[in-house]
Image (tube, rainbow, N blue to C red):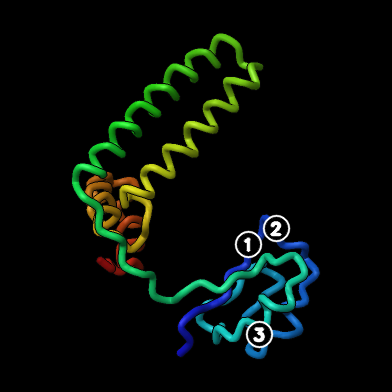
Amino acid sequence: MSKSHAYRNLKICSKDCLCLFVCPTGAANNETGQIDFETCIGCGACMKACPARAITMIPNKLPAQAKKDNKVINELFKVADSKIKEIKILNYLLEKNPNDKLVRALIHSNRVILEDLMRESGYMLPQSKNTHELLNKLKSNDDIKDKVQRLLNKLEVNE
């Protein structure tokens, strides 16, 4: 079994589909636009042939999350809280003037920063214990309970 498999980013795929011709197993599928992880042997031929560089090799087993001191995590959350407050203020301003492009840009910028902070604190890494704890809390919501459980079954805690 290979240590990695191919992943196609559909946002940058040019649909030249050279990957179809070089894939020895037929894992690259033009109909769905995805690469079948079960069929992919991780040889990387599709990635090398892709003129748009839309295919990357990703590891089958994700690395363990780096340990962070509680003080660092607390500081990350303080900054995250301030970003959430800023987004709320900016959303209020946007309600008053829906065409304000600067406010829209600031909202987007704050969301990107917030996502990065949450990722750094370990809440957006699929292999992290934090993510599993968050998903287990979400199981109490009956509307998404089954979906969350399917996701938990696929994600291995790696820390």
Q: Relative to residue 49, is residue 25 drawn left or right?
A: left
- Image position, residue 132 (x, y; %): 26, 57
Alpha carbon separation for disc pair 3 and 2 = 21 Å
Q: Which residue is mark 1?
A: 9
Q: Quadrant of residue 50?
A: bottom right
Q: Are marks 3 and 2 in contact (CB under 8 Å)?
A: no
* Mark identifier at residue 45: none
Mark found first going from the N terminus, 3 or 2: 2
Residue at (57, 20) in percent of width and height? 103
Residue at (48, 31) in percent of width and height? 110
Three-letter residue code for mark 1: Asn
Against 81, is 113 above or below? Answer: below
- Image position, residue 12 (x, y; %): 70, 58
Residue at (65, 21) in percent of width and height? 101
- Image position, residue 124 (x, y; %): 37, 51
Q: Relative to residue 42, is residue 61 drawn left or right?
A: left
For the N terminus, which image quadrant?
bottom left
Q: Are marks 1 and 2 in contact (CB under 8 Å)?
A: yes
Q: Looking at this view, is 87 or 134 the one in front?
A: 87
* Mark in front: 1 vs 3: 1
Q: Which residue is mark 2?
A: 12
Q: Are marks 1 and 3 in contact (CB under 8 Å)?
A: no
* Mark identifier at residue 26: 3
Alpha carbon separation for disc pair 1 and 2 = 6 Å
Mark found first going from the N terminus, 1 or 3: 1
Q: Looking at this view, is 14 or 72 the one in front?
A: 72
Three-letter residue code for mark 3: Gly
Secondary structure, mark 2, is loop
